[in-house]
Every structure is written in structure tokens, then in C-alpha cells.
Amino acid sequence: MYFRFDLKAVLQFLKYAGNHKRLIFANFIFNLLYVLFQLISLMMIMPVLRFLFSKDHGNAQALSSKNFGVGHWFSDQYQHFITWFGQLAKGEPFTALAYLSISLVVVTVLKNGFRFLAMNFMVLIRNRSIQEIRQNVYQKCLDLPIAYFNNERKGDLMSRMSNDVKEIEFALMVSLEALYFQPLNILLFMAALIMLSAKLTLYILLFLPITALIIGLIGRSLRKRSTRNQELLGKVMTAYDETLGGIRIIKAFNAAHFFSKKYKEQDDAYTKNNIGVQRRYDLSSPMSETIGIGVSALLLWLGGSMVFRNELDPEFFLTYFAIFSQLIPPFKAFSNALYAAQKGIASLDRIQELVTAPVTVEDPIEAQVPVFTESIVLKDVGFNYLDGAKVIEGFNLEIKKGDTVALVGPSGAGKTTLTDLLARFYDVTEGGIFLDGVDIRSFKQDDLRGLIGIVNQENILFNESVRNNIALGMPETPLGAVIEAATAANANDFIVEMEHGYDTEIGERGGKLSGGQKQRLAIARALLKDPEILILDEATSALDSNSEKAVQQALEKLMRARTSIIIAHRLSTVIHADVIVVLDKGKIVEKGTHTELLEKKGMYFNLIQLQQLLSN
Ligand code: ADP
């Protein structure tokens, strides 16, 4: 079999859908009614034929009991019906025909009404389950540690949220209905065929496996090639994309010929495969029609001979033929559904992988409440990112409450990583960080982060009002407090000049604001939170000197009476720090006050000289 079912994924999926048992039940009932009414509408050919062709217009011409088992019972019931109907129409052929026509319309309306209702419930099941999946993914993203979100992953996560969820919605959801509904359809139709003539059904069943095999083989090769087609087209697109990205280098190094050749190879492979797909696709329709007609011809011959031998009534036979011809679409739909489900399951796997990804930074089961009255101590701290070498090594530092500590050093030294460790965006891999002597891993992350305020280089603003951006995570904050914080951050002046003041929507990623304005909003946000510990990561680096002054003043207010950790590229901003820690390659090179370090004439001294040289 070419359908591999990942049972675990299917069960996971059923869990989502299974939360809507009532809707599923309703969908099932209406689908059942739909199939039954479809059968009834097909079987209405029988009395029509009877009244058209029998001379006495349906009056009790006893059907010989040529059937056995249920077939016999069915013939009897049918005979009763004809007798009753003949009386109802008072033996008038026109009346009978009129009744039958009206009934046909009524039955068809009901049939389609039921199908509509069934689909309607399916729409509800589909949307609610998919919404649940989407919500789970979103919620999970909020719970996952920062380490999970590197840059390559962001694209992948976006694609999971959009493409995979869509794929599940269309492939899996649509096919799930078909997977139970089509077999039901086939079963009920088969039952009807057996009732009409068990013998003929037995003959036909003998030929069915051969036909199924031929149709299956074509379908299989078509599917395999279509999947391959997607891969090959992907390669062509990648080649094109790579070329566009590197066009400057390709031209500069005269590599056009090489790339052109490489591209042609990819394109040739795709084109060849695509021709195969289209040929097979074009073949499948005439093939299945030919096979269909072949089987019908066989049925005609077998059934016709039974009619001649008086083993089957013509009207039974013609109805049989009509129902039989309606059997192929459900078979086709079922096999398509299997294929679609397989694709959907691949997507579901990817979603499940995300939803079950381990949360590596965990809250302890019995958490302590953090208190900060004395100091933060980093003891023998070591850290490496999942896939890399040590970026922090043997790091020891005590930060007294109220102190301002500056971290300086070349880019890549590990300054940001250190502050991330303090906020537990990552956990240390060696040693520990202690708040008043208690390991920060003993606190809930929310409690710990409640003590910390962060202002960094990229001032993340959200597509919300100015007010909500400042009072982030604290929607109950009164406007007065927000204004107070904004005023202290030198932001009030430009906010009130905005179109709707504090209610102005900021736009995606703060697009409407200048760098300095964004910075001051971020500072107002930190001021409002009023944290014990403040982390400023390159908070003034992206500013022109004009706005730097306003921001600098705001920052000074923010740092007053707080424990602050500053990372600054411009050393002029750190001279007043209580301790300056010079970092290189994850290790402390030297530490002390500005004056002490200058006297040492070490790395700090060199960095200062270098900056003075550059600014002159
Ligand atoms: P600094 O803030 O001093 O410029 P960082 O703390 O940002 O330095 O980076 C320290 C080292 O860790 C660098 O070598 C950097 O390449 C690496 N690094 C930073 N973030 C990650 C990450 N998410 N995954 C892997 N390596 C990282």
C-alpha cells in the first residue's frame, strides 16, 4: 500500500475533531439521510418503468419470486408498494406519472437539503478544530523559551502557522469526512444492489478486484510523480532565487555560464517529470471511462441474459444499472481522500512537533517568591548556545543593590547573553545566578521578570495605541500613571501632538515614529513598570545627538535609585558607573571604576583611546 498512516498523528487529529462529538454526530446523521434519499431517488426509476411499460399500468401483475434472501423480501415489499400505488392513482397512468414526478422532486429536494446540512456541520467541525490548532500553536509559541526562536526558525514557524494549518484544514478535514462517508455510501449502495439481485452482484464482485487494480496503478504512479513535481519545481525556484540574490557576484566572476547550465539541468528534470504527470493525467480520464464502459458492457450482458432467462425483471435490472453507475464516484472520492489525508498528516506531524516541543526553561514545581534587598551574585557562570561553543566562561560578579554596573567589550563578547541569563531567557549551563543568595531557577519566570525592566536597542513596539504600548502587560493602569511615566521619559510632548494623543495607534513595529521617539516610549514603559533591576542594552546607540540628549535625561531618571546593568558601545555613557566590567570572549578581562581602569592602561584604556581616535 502506498498510504502510510501515522496512527499517532491521526489520533492527535481526532482529538481536535473529537471535541465536537455532537457536531460529528449531526454530520453523520445527515450524511446517512442523504445517502438513503439518494438511493430512494434512484429507485424511483422502478415504478416509473413499471407504469410506462406494463400494459395494465401497474395493476397486480405478480412478480415471480426470482430472488432469494433479502432480495425475495424486497421483491415482495416492492410488489405491495406497486399495488398500493396503483390504487392510489386509481389505475390512471397519467395520475401515477404525475405523482411519481412530484415525489421525485420532493425526494431530490430533501436529499440535497440533507447534504447541505451535513456539510454545514462539517464546516463548523472544521473551523472549530482548526481554530483550536491555531490557538494551541500561538499559545505554545508564547510558552517556548527564547532559544527556540532563531532566525531560520521564524520563517519555518510562519509557514507552519499558515501553510500547514491550511493544509490540515483542506486536506485532512475534507478527507476525514470522505473517509467515513464514502465507505458508508458504498456499503448502502452495495446493499441496494444485493437486494435488487444478489446473483448479479456476486458476478460483478468477481470482476471488481481486477478493475480496482488497474485504476489503482494509474493513480499511484500519478501521485508519485506529482509529489516529485513539487520537489523539482522547488529546486528550480531555489536556483532562480539564489541567482537573483547573487547576480552581482555571478557577473563579477563570469559565472553566468556555469549557473545557466546548472539551472537548465534543474529545469530539464522538472519539465520531463511534468510531461510524465500530464500524460498520465490525460490518460487517466479515457482509461477510467474505457474501463467503466467495459464493466458496464459486462453488466449489460450478464444482467441482460438474466432478464432473457426470466431471472430478473427489466425494471430491477435498469435500476440496478443506474445504482451501479453511481458507485464509481464514491470509490474515486475515497481514494482521493486517502491521498489528501496522507498529505494532511505530514502537515499535522509538523504542527504536533511544534506543539509538543519541550519547554526547556521551566518553572519549578515549588517556587519561591523572589526578594531583592542585598545583591545579585553570578557564580562560576558558564553558558553555551545549543549548537555552539562556550560564550560565557567562569564568570564571577557581585552586583550590590543600587549599583550601576556597565558591561563593555568588543561585539560578540557575550554582554547581551549575560543579561539574557539574568532574565532567564536562557538558563546557565554551569554555575548559577543568585538573588539574595537564592538561585534564580527557584523562582517562577513571571515573578523574576516582574523585578526586571529591559530597554534595548530594538525598541519593540506593538500595533496598538501609545497608551497600551507604554502600559504593556498592565492594561488596568490609569491614564494618569501612563502620562506621568511618559512625561518622565520626555515623551509626553510628542505624544500629545499626535493625532489622537495617547490613543493614537502606533502602526506595525512603530513605523510612524522616529528612533528617538520609540526609544523614549520604551523608557516610559520601563519607568511605568518601576522595576528593581534595570537592563539597558545599547539603549542610546541608534540615536542622533539631538534626541540622544532627551533620551539620556530620561535614562538618568530611570536609573535613579535602581540597580542597573548597562551595555553601551559609547563609553562616554558608562563613566559614572559604580563598576565597569570589561568582557572579552565571555570572560572578565578587568573590572573597576572608570578612573581605576584608566590607570591600569589595559583593554578599557585601549577601547577609550580607540573611540577618541574615531570621534576625532
Ligand atoms: P555582545 O552582546 O557582547 O555583542 P552576544 O551576547 O550577543 O555578544 O553574543 C555572544 C556570542 O554568542 C557571539 O559569538 C554570538 O555569535 C553568539 N550568539 C548570540 N546569540 C546566539 C544564539 N541565539 N545562538 C547561537 N549563538 C549566539
Image (spheres, rainbow, N blue to C red):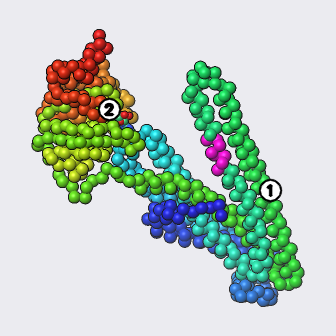
Tell me, for residue 585, which label it has, or none.
2
- 228 is within the stretch colored magenta: yes
> Mark 1 or mark 2: which is in front?
2
Q: Amino acid at mark 1?
A: Pro
| Closest to the observer, 26 or 183 | 183
| Closest to the observer, 184 or 321 | 184
**Majority secondary structure of magenta residues:** helix
- The residue drawn where x is 37% and y is 44% is 147
Q: Earlier in the sequence, mark 1 or mark 2?
A: 1
Q: Residues within 10 Å of mark 1 (few under 14, many from 20)?
A: few
Res 207 quadrant in image: bottom right
Residue 501 relative to residue 308: left or right: left
Q: Is residue 249 visible?
A: yes
Res 151 quadrant in image: top left
Magenta region, residue range: 227-234
Kind of element beneath mark 1: helix
Q: Amino acid at mark 2?
A: Lys
- 175 is within the stretch colored magenta: no
The count of marks equals 2
Residue 599 image offset from top left, x and y in percent: 17, 19
Name the residue tied to disc 1: 286
| Closest to the observer, 166 or 596 | 596
Q: Quadrant of ligand 1?
A: top left
- The residue drawn where x is 44% and y is 52% is 354
Tell me, for residue 457, which label it has, or none.
none
- The residue drawn where x is 72% and y is 80% is 194
- The residue drawn where x is 30% and y is 22% is 543
Does the residue tagged 1 have its C-beta within 8 Å of any atom of ligand 1? no
Q: Quadrant of the N terminus?
A: bottom right
Q: CA distance from mark 1 to mark 2?
A: 70 Å
| Closest to the observer, 508 or 266 | 266
